[in-house]
Image (cartoon, rainbow, N blue to C red):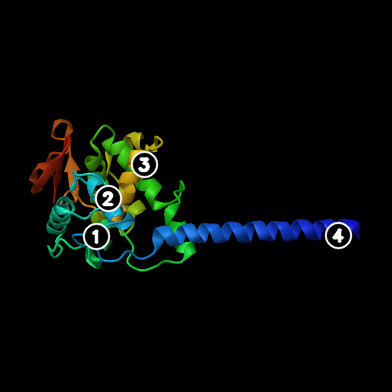
Amino acid sequence: MKIDFILRIKIIITVLVIFITAVFEYAAYDLTKTAMSNLYWGNTGSDVAKVQARLKDWGYYTGAVDGFFGVRTWLAVRKFQAYNGLRVTGIVDDDTKVALGFTTTAQDLAAYYASSSVTTNDDVYLLAMLINGEARGEPYIGKVAVGAVVMNRVRDPRFPKTIAGVIFQPGAFSAVDDGQMWLPPTNDSIRAARDAIAGWDPTGGALYYYNAARVTSYWIFNRPIITQIGSHIFAR
């Protein structure tokens, strides 16, 4: 009987610990994942700081991440909207939030945890491995650009419909063929993969990229060039 009593006490304590932990984690989730309101000139607060930080990471904003929506933030938002084909208003509306990778509706806790962790089996890690193999030594925006090409191919009917399908399409990426992809990805590569999956496309819709000094398949020169980022030329 004494053993049963101790066992019951341990079970109760375990359940209470799990419950209390879940309550605190859910509270933290609510603080970070609650739907972001529309933001505009004059707003202040953590949501403004999140937008500034994202725009700064993506090369649109050069000011301080101070949580104040002033002229620099307004101009950066307009620049981001123009580049991504959105209505150029300077207001962080729902379409702009989605393009920036922010949520517009409160998500449940399970979805939050599913999207916030990175494992060696998920799309973020897989794309990060490719980025690390293909764009090691490139500037951060160049890493995102390589990820964006993969995402553009996923959306294009001429290519496989999944990230894995695009990456492992025979002959598609030299880093897969020469084994460079299998090196552990850096934190920057993982962050770049997240940004590319969230929708940042510094290439303007590119489906191909190449380093002109290392080209071995000269058909690539027939593809219309969009832009150059770092040592990579991006083309349609």
| Residue 171 image offset from top left, x and y in percent | 27, 43
Label 4 sits on a secondary structure element that is helix
Circle 3 — which element? helix
Q: Give the image location of residue 18, x and y in percent.
A: 63, 58
Q: Which residue is mark 1?
A: 43
Foreground mark, 2 or 1, reads 1
Q: Are marks 2 and 3 in contact (CB under 8 Å)?
A: no
Name the N-terminal-most of marks 2 and 3. 2
Tell me the CA gap for discs 2 and 4: 55 Å
Q: Secondary structure at mark 1?
A: loop
User: On the image, which quarter does residue 99 sit in?
Assistant: bottom left
Q: Tag 2, which secondary structure?
A: helix
Instruction: Using the rendered view, name the quadrant where residue 211 is placed.
Output: top left
Residue type at numbered disc 3:
Met
Q: Which residue is mark 4?
A: 4
Task: Find residue 63 and report its horizontal and vertical position in percent.
Answer: 20, 44
**Which mark sits nearer the N-terminus, 4 or 3?**
4
Tell me the crowding category of disc 4: few under 14, some 14 to 19, or many 20 or more residues within 10 angstroms, Cα based. Answer: few
Q: Nearer the viewer, residue 52 or 97?
A: 52
Tell me the tag on residue 129.
3
Give the labeled residue for mark 2.
54
Q: Tell me which amino acid carries mark 1.
A: Asn
- Is there a contact, CB below 8 Å, between mark 2 and mark 1? no
Please name the amino acid that badge 2 sits on. Arg
Of the numbered discs 2 and 1, the one sitting upstream in the chain is: 1
In the image, residue 217 sits, relative to residue 53, either above or below, namely above
Between the C-alphas of marks 2 and 3, the distance is 22 Å
> Mark 2 or mark 4: which comes first in sequence?
4
**Distance between the alpha carbons at the discs numbered 2 and 1:** 17 Å
> What's under tag 4, amino acid-wise?
Asp
